[in-house]
Image (tube, coloured by chain):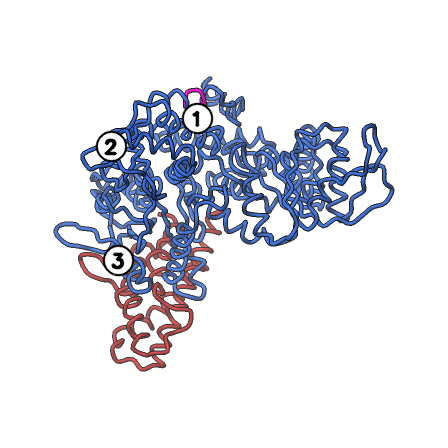
Amino acid sequence: MSARTRPRARVLVIDDQPRTAELLAREAPELEIQTVRSGGEARAHARSWREAAPVLEGRRPPDVVVLDLRFDLPDEQLLPDERPLGESAAARRLRRERRDRQGLFILERLRRRRPEIAVLLTTAYEEIPFEQEALELKADAFTYAAAEEESGSGRLLVSRLRRILEERAAPQRTGRFFWGTSAAMRELRRKVSALAPTPMPLLVTGPTGTGKSLLVRDVIHPLSGRPGAFVAFDCATVPEGLLQAALFGALRGSFTGAVADRPGVFEAAADGTLFLDEIENLAPDAQKMLLTALNDGTIRRLGSAAETPHTARVVAASNAALTHAASNAALAHAASNAALTHAASNAALGRRTAEGSFRSDLLMRLNPSLALELPPLSQRREDLPELARLTASAFWDNPRHRRAIASLVRAAGGPDPEPADAFTLAVSEREARDSASAVVFVLPGKAWAAMQRHPWPGNLRQFEMILADSLAAAVYAGPGASLDRGGRVRIPLDPRMLFDLLAGARASEPPPSGAGFSGFAGFGSGSERPRASSVAGFRRELERSALRALFREAGGDFARMAERMTGSASAKEARAVRLRFNKLGLSARDEK
Amino acid sequence: MGVSEAAERLRHDLAKAIRFSAPEVPETETEALRERLHADVATTRRDDSGSQSAAEVFDAWRLEEGRHFAGALGRRVDDIASAIEEVRGLTVRLPSLSRPELERLDALTRRVASECRALASEARRDSRR
């Protein structure tokens, strides 16, 4: 996990056809197309998982894999079990299915071994038929259909690949905000670059600990180019009675204790960015005033009759729950434009009224359709190695910790660890042995595996805290350092302590967002359990039943279904649910 | 295999491949254009046992799947077939084609790709009805 500069990005092409590899070699000479050895010959593309695996598991794994979806291969080379299928009608069907989705089988296998590698999944299908599965497996999907209109399909693939590599090479931190290289975060980076310089109000959503306030402070505000200050305001911490004064200011004598005129945060953030954190906690009156401020561009100090213009750009943040409210608001908005049926509109409005402590018009003003969604850490596990490395770097850069490390190193007989890159956080014995650094923190492989599996309900904040605590324990209360045969100083991290910290984190987890949802509970009883003549058919029926139950439970709202299924009610997720719903032969009209 | 899946397969095997290396505007250098068309049209699909031209890829597909396509979809397949016939004739003479003929072949690859995409979209729409 030490930082090294790679001269050329490595690309592995997994495709039954050679043309993608040939095109990349010709059009992108700056890339190293990895060679695959098979049957004594070298080739620039792997035709199957069996050919790709040695490269993926080798010491020089690729930075990006370009993976085709459909493979015309003999049965013995097709995942999942690489065995002959025979010539019955069922075997032919199975063969076709395996060929059509072989890329996904390979992707699944690849993810188990190499979660950190970027994968560009390519397909000629206009609608990617397995889009949801591909997204779950953290692949960038590229469809040739969009590319074919003007330029050749391969050339746009090259530019897409270059973009992925550029994004991966971009700094992993901006200020204290951690980007990582997962597909979701690369998409977020693109969105932030486009939206940050605009004056429009923004909404940032995501579970606690994902870095919402860091994103606004360290990324959005600097990118906005606004000369004014960044001012953060936590809507949850100010008592309701003081909110108006805190936000908009107050005149002397306007309330008991107002001994002088006082500006509010809107004025403090003049020509700058006003960050309203946990906006879902804003009281109804304050919501109304905020809406006026956003709509009219004016504010009124408490006790004053005069309205004055303000120049603050508002960025609000909320946990994931608000996204659902936003989707309801969007639905209600659409319904009011007679775009939806009466029944659907009633359902949406009814829900909003039942749940609704937040004004839908205020949400609409915050542009919920452009909301910047920070995914939970559990959905971007491929970022864990880099996050661990940066956390260890931050620990190393702390002067106090560095002094303590230096004394450990001296006690072990090593040289002073001066250069900033002289350490490695190794997550296995093998990495420790291979490290070229003078100081190696050694995290046992099983502890790292547990960290990779952990659900991380507290997200990045919790991950950084637990790793920093483990490093501190190793430096201040560990068994000390030792010099290994390669002259490196090893500082072991205590796996038991790490397991204890993880267990503590697990014990304090909130219940999952879908807990208590009755749609799936009925399956245990057998009353709704579907039947089918084959395992595949049973699986399909099971999925159909689950989606139908979920559809009923969610009142026919796909965003709400998506939220129940994935924790996110984004338009993208809702679309994926709707596609799957239709793909399974279900009809929203029939189910209502 | 259903009509939609068969059309998607044609799109994968032929539409994607027949303009795989094409730039947005045809190459100004005639030999570069000829070289690209050779890769895209004469050796459209390749494996250890050899290569297949675009016309051969289409022939193999039509032999296996063509019977599924009738009515409007059948007429669309016929349109592709007529473009492919012209592609076939030009491919045979590829090494000696003049610049205008190469440009004609390039335009035909665009037409085949576009017709295959249209076929896949229409077949998918039909299968949803």
Q: CA distance from mark 1 to mark 3?
A: 44 Å
Depth order, front residue of A43/A198: A198
Quadrant of the rendered image containing residue A216 = top right
Residue A131: assigned label: none
Magenta stretch secondary structure, dominant: helix
Q: Which mark sits nearer the N-terminus, 1 or 2?
A: 2
Which stretch appears magenta?
A502-506
**Which callout, 1 or 3, points at the residue further toward the start of the chain?**
3
Amino acid type at image mark 2: Gly
| Residue A470 image offset from top left, x and y in percent | 38, 27
Q: Which mark is residue A18?
A: 3
* Chain painted in blue in the figure: A
Colour of chain B as rendered = red
Q: Position of residue B32 (x, y in %)?
A: 31, 74
Can you identify the residue that label 1 sits on?
A: A530
Percent of width and height locating residue A540: 41, 33
Q: Quadrant of the N terminus of chain A?
A: top left
In this view of the protein, which residue sits in the foreground, A2 or A483? A483
- Dot 3 falls on a residue whose secondary structure is loop
